[in-house]
Amino acid sequence: MERLPKLAIPILIGVVILIIFVAKSTVTIGSGQAGVLYKTFDDGVVTDEPPLNEGFHFVAPWNKVFVYEVRQQSLEEKMQVLSSNGLQIDIDASTWFQPSYEKLGSLHSEKGEEYISRLLQPAVRSAARSVVGRYNPEQLYSSKREAIQKEILEETQILLQDQYVQVNEVLVRDVSLPPNIKDAIERKLRQEQESLEYEFRLTKATQEAERQRIDAEGKARANEILNASLTPNILKEKGIQATVELAKSNNSKTVVIGSGEGGLPLILGGAN
């Protein structure tokens, strides 16, 4: 019985050491994450094997695991760049990216955990400066935002080729110009819009005048054809046809044959 306290101390120490050993030998990778294994007594960062995926893992206590976010992430950037004529432009952009899962070990070995500031940000800024430098302020302000986004994305992807980072999209949220330049562009755009509206009204009025001219010419031509076709004989025939139709009606009338103008029948009366 007296020996039990003496045995309890080594057992307690052993239990504590075991707990520490187990704690140092396990790692939990969270959702949307992956782990890069570093072997202290081997070749260092493991690059020839897939990274540790989500879940619970046993790792030798002398090794380390570096955990990375592998889901799509967003990098918010506010940049000052120059247009084609040297004017300073402020751009507010978002870059959607994620590290290459299969090459996560190489990314850690060559770029490190600070790969966003060391690799991604410089690439996005360089691409933005290159692309914006091709356009003048008016193009940047009015009509080229979608083209700018696409070109920045393409140039960023070229810069990061084989760099273990995947860039999915670049969104330009805002393009800010100096107030005086912005006001000048807006005035010009309003003037262009007013000019287009005036040209539209002028074109419409011209088309209406042309329509009326064509309509009048058509009516005049129709009258000419009609007048040419109304010979005395035709008029006499029409008068006879009208007389016959009137004679068939039940109304009281008196028809004098040959007493009208041009020898047409003369109709007298017409009431019941």
Image (spheres, rainbow, N blue to C red):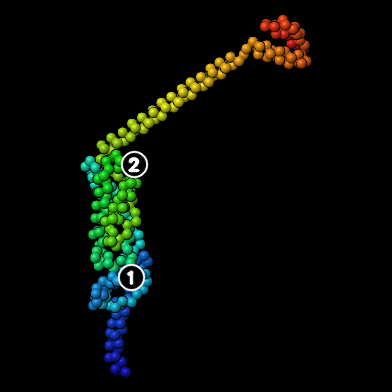
Frontmost residue, 236 versus 193: 236
> Going by the image, does 201 lie left or right of 14?
right
**Residue 50, labelled with which disc?**
1
For disc 2, the marked residue is: 143
Q: Amino acid at mark 1?
A: Pro
Residue ID at (33%, 70%): 50
Q: Residues within 10 Å of mark 1 (few under 14, many from 20)?
A: some
Image quarter (top left, top right, bottom left or bottom right) of the N terminus: bottom left
Residue ID at (60%, 15%): 229
What secondary structure is found at the residue carrying circle 2? loop
Residue 190 position in % (x across, y down): 34, 33
As drawn, 198 above or below 136: above
> Going by the image, does 204 lie left or right of 153?
right
Residue ID at (30%, 42%): 140
Image quarter (top left, top right, bottom left or bottom right) of the C terminus: top right
Residue 83 position in % (x across, y down): 24, 43
Q: Amino acid at mark 2?
A: Ser
Q: Residues within 10 Å of mark 2 (few under 14, many from 20)?
A: few
The quadrant in which residue 201 appears is top left
